[in-house]
Image: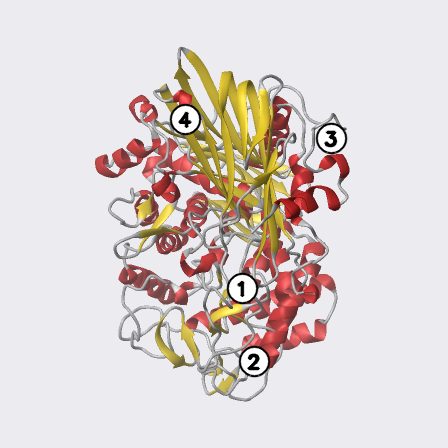
């Protein structure tokens, strides 16, 4: 429990002087933008009532700066924020196997992501407010609440500022009086100390992760003072509430991912001391946010005035029940995915199963990093959506974890109890399990193909940017994965195959030559050879991987089912309508199998497998289906899958919650999982543009509902971006810009043109 003595230690003995528990004397501020930065015609999600705290995961509106996040309720008499720090994890390295040779998967050893704090702003005198509206402004990155009380207008602005690294709650309106309460989410009470306007808590987990949270408030008029562990404000017309928090986590395996010299309370107090005016804080945040958001404008057509007049939840339900296209709603869903990427992935840890947004300390699957689709899908969107810098969090995470992953693999993978071990008794490089945490630890079962799939995601980012420095950064991951597979592959009459393995997440657990693994390893060896040539290092080893690649068994079409085989068997050995599309990993997100180069029978095998899997699944399963149907140029099925993701989640069904979060049906409850919110928008962009190095295809799967529109800044593999406009299903213009690429072929229907550009050059085409 945090005592007054501990509080005073955090505030004084840490040597922060006037910055800690500050009286807020003026101090130098960073140069900040001036003028009104707000987009005057923002894309918003809006609601006529506050969120129910018991339904916060479905109704709360998300904010974040990549490190700090919150779900916001928007209540008038009592508003609430459920606050997180992306590094607040229990657990440990988890490097002792269980009796079956697999990793423990529990909140004690593997650990779990959890809440940091709950913040309440109470103004009971404003009961009975009218003209209420709360909104998530996607264009400016803020949550707003507006209402009328006593004939006066009131407005709240809530956002997580990346430049200031704090959460801001601003209350604007005459004569506001109330209290602010900060509660640690693990039983830590806040303490305050008059005359300073701050409340703070500290705590630590058994794994020695230390953490803290602090809230301050100030106003140019009225009063703000400590009242016990609360802050009380009175007569304020412009109140700025600042929350900061953090941990002593560091992305350094050699330090055990913890820095004992970091005092989270000291850092949080220093950040919470920001003293800029509310308008300046907002301008700083919005200017930073819009540097990313404004890179891509999305117009899929105009909705009706009646549709525009509906609140977001009513509109979602109307779209599902009427069948009438609502292109602006669908465009806002795409932009919501971009919003989650910007707010959830900025120079810190990557987006986990729930991103930054939790309702409790017991998230399903511990809100971990799943390596057999989920973390990869979380990053399908970034490059396509003009957010390449938001990808860095995933790359930096993998680089930081690599030493621990390597040590665990070489010490544990060949355990005699591990049914997935290499039968030749060799081991090298690194591997992961199906789940990973932030301490270098793995959970659940070993996942041999996971290293190759992570490398696919990492290398594809290079294909979008052609950044040699980035390629050098991820090179050790590529090489270590190759070393693992060089040691693992088994020679058979059919070629080199994966050893005993499991096709995620169904079927036999002891099959060799899985289509899933064969495709991933084929791609891994291709990527590595390119990397050795670009970087001019280990080129002889790169040639060796090319030789292994040429000897790999490649999947076939079953003569019995007509489907692409998932196992080296003509029989379908798993669940016919399984949620995963593991055997299609070489079709999407990979593209070794593609409509240009692959035999027609193989493409038909892909199509039949997709049909057999069906069009009903969890949101992430539908997003994967949509992307695959887009690759097959089947616009109707791709669009159908997107609409199923958008279907309102009612009575715990799969679909979208009122706040657009994707809900995963789980018996008598539903849970939030973020991957569909990022994968479905990526599939939407895939419907508008398909690219691989050397080819850019425009409008490959355009649905009739989007017959006229435009999108700017679409990322294209090969080192390009594209601004695209179309009318009545026909391309009217395409501006292709090189971000590092040289030449490519641009196609639309039967038209094509070869272009060659220097970095920074662009050309506008009108097919």
Q: Residues within 10 Å of mark 2 (few under 14, many from 20)?
A: many
Q: Which numbered disc, 4 or 1, marks the residue that appears first in the sequence? A: 4
Residue receiving disc 4: 76
Q: Is residue 428 left or right of residue 420?
A: right
Write down the residue under mark 2.
412
Residue 359 visible in rendering: yes
- Per the image, the residue denoted by label 3 is 30
Image vertical order of residue 760 relative to residue 582, above or below: above
Pointer 1: residues within 10 angstroms few (<14), some, or many (20+)? many
Label 3 to label 1, Cα distance in Å?
A: 38 Å
Measure the alpha-carbon separation of dots 4 and 1. 38 Å
Q: Nearer the viewer, residue 750 or 211?
A: 211
In the picture, measured across the screen, residue 288 lies left or right of residue 609, that is right
The quarter of the displayed image where residue 52 is located: top left
Say which residue appears at 35% left-offset and 46% top-offset.
Answer: 642
Of mark 3 and mark 1, the one earlier in the sequence is: 3
Q: Are marks 3 and 2 in contact (CB under 8 Å)?
A: no
SS state under label 3: loop
For disc 1, the marked residue is 91
Q: Position of residue 190 (x, y in %)?
A: 55, 42
Q: How many marks?
A: 4
| First of labels 2, 1 by sequence position | 1
Dot 2 falls on a residue whose secondary structure is helix
Q: Secondary structure at mark 1?
A: loop
Dots 2, 1 in contact, CB < 8 A: no
Mark 2 and mark 1: Cα distance apart in space: 19 Å
* C-alpha span from label 3 to label 2: 50 Å
Counting from the top left corner in percent of width and height, residue 382 is at: 54, 47
**How did the renderer colour the structure?**
secondary structure
Query: Mark 4 against mark 3, which lies toward the viewer?
Result: 4
């Amino acid at each position: 429990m945090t005592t007054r003595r501990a509080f005073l230690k955090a505030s004084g003995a840490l040597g922060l002087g006037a910055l800690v528990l500050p009286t807020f004397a003026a101090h130098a501020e960073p140069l900040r933008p001036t003028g009104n930065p707000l987009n005057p015609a923002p894309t918003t999600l809006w609601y006529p009532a506050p969120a129910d705290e018991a339904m916060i995961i479905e109704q709360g509106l998300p904010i974040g700066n990549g490190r700090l996040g919150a779900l916001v309720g928007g209540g008038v008499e009592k508003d609430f924020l459920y606050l997180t720090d992306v590094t607040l994890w229990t657990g440990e390295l988890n490097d002792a196997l269980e009796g079956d040779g697999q990793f423990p998967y529990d909140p004690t050893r593997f650990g779990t992501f959890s809440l940091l704090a709950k913040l309440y702003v109470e103004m009971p005198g404003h009961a009975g407010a009218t003209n209420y509206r709360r909104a998530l402004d996607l264009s400016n990155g803020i949550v707003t609440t507006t209402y009328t009380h006593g004939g006066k207008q009131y407005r709240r602005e809530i956002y997580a500022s990346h430049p200031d690294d704090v959460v801001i709650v601003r209350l604007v309106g005459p004569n506001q009086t109330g209290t602010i309460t900060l509660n640690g989410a693990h039983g830590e009470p806040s303490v305050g100390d008059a005359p300073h306007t701050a409340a703070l808590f500290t705590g630590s987990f058994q794994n020695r992760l230390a953490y803290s949270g602090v809230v301050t408030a100030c106003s140019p008029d009225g009063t703000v003072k400590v009242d016990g562990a609360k802050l009380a404000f009175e007569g304020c017309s412009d109140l700025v509430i600042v929350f900061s928090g953090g941990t002593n986590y560091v992305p350094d395996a050699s330090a055990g991912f913890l820095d004992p010299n970091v005092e989270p309370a000291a850092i949080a107090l220093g950040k919470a001391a920001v003293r800029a005016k509310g308008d300046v804080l907002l301008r700083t945040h919005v200017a930073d946010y819009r540097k990313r958001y404004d890179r891509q404008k999305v117009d899929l057509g105009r909705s009706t005035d009646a549709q525009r007049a509906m609140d977001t939840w009513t509109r979602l339900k109307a779209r599902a029940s009427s069948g009438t296209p609502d292109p602006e709603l669908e465009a806002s869903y795409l932009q919501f995915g971009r919003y989650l990427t910007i707010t959830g992935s900025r120079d810190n840890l990557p987006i986990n199963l729930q991103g930054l947004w939790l309702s409790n300390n017991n998230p399903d699957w511990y809100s971990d990093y799943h390596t057999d689709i989920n973390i990869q899908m979380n990053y399908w969107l970034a490059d396509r959506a003009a957010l390449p810098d938001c990808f860095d969090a995933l790359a930096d995470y993998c680089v930081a974890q690599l030493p621990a992953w390597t040590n665990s693999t070489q010490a544990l993978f060949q355990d005699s109890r591990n049914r997935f071990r290499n039968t030749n008794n060799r081991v090298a490089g690194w591997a992961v399990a199906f789940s990973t945490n932030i301490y270098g630890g793995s959970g659940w079962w070993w996942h041999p193909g996971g290293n190759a799939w992570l490398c696919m995601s990492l290398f594809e980012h290079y294909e979008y940017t052609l950044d040699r420095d980035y390629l050098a950064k991820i090179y050790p991951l590529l090489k270590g994965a190759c070393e693992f597979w060089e040691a693992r592959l088994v020679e058979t009459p059919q070629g080199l195959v994966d050893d005993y393995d499991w096709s995620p997440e169904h079927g036999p657990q002891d099959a060799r030559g899985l289509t899933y693994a064969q495709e991933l390893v084929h791609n891994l060896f291709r990527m590595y050879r390119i990397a050795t040539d670009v970087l001019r290092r280990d080129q002889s080893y790169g040639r060796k991987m090319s030789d292994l690649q040429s000897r790999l068994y490649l999947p076939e079409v079953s003569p019995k089912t007509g489907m692409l085989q998932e196992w080296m068997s003509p029989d379908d050995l798993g669940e016919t309508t399984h949620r995963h599309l593991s055997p299609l990993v070489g079709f999407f997100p990979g593209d070794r199998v593609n409509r240009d180069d692959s035999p027609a029978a193989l493409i038909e095998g892909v199509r039949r497998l997709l049909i057999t899997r069906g069009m009903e699944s969890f949101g992430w399963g539908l997003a994967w289906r949509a992307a695959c149907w887009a690759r097959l140029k089947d616009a109707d099925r791709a669009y159908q899958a997107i609409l199923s993701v958008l279907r309102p989640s009612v009575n715990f069904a799969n679909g979208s919650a009122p706040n657009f979060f994707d809900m995963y049906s789980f018996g008598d409850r539903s849970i939030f999982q973020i991957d569909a919110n990022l994968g479905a928008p990526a599939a939407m962009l895939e419907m508008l543009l398909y690219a691989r190095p050397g080819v850019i295809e425009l409008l490959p799967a355009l649905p009739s509902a989007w017959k006229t529109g435009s999108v700017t800044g679409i990322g294209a593999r090969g080192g390009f971006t594209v601004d695209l406009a179309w009318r009545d299903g026909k391309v009217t213009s395409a501006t292709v810009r090189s971000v590092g690429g040289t030449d490519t072929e641009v196609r639309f229907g039967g038209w094509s043109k070869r272009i060659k550009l220097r970095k920074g050059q662009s050309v506008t085409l009108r097919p």
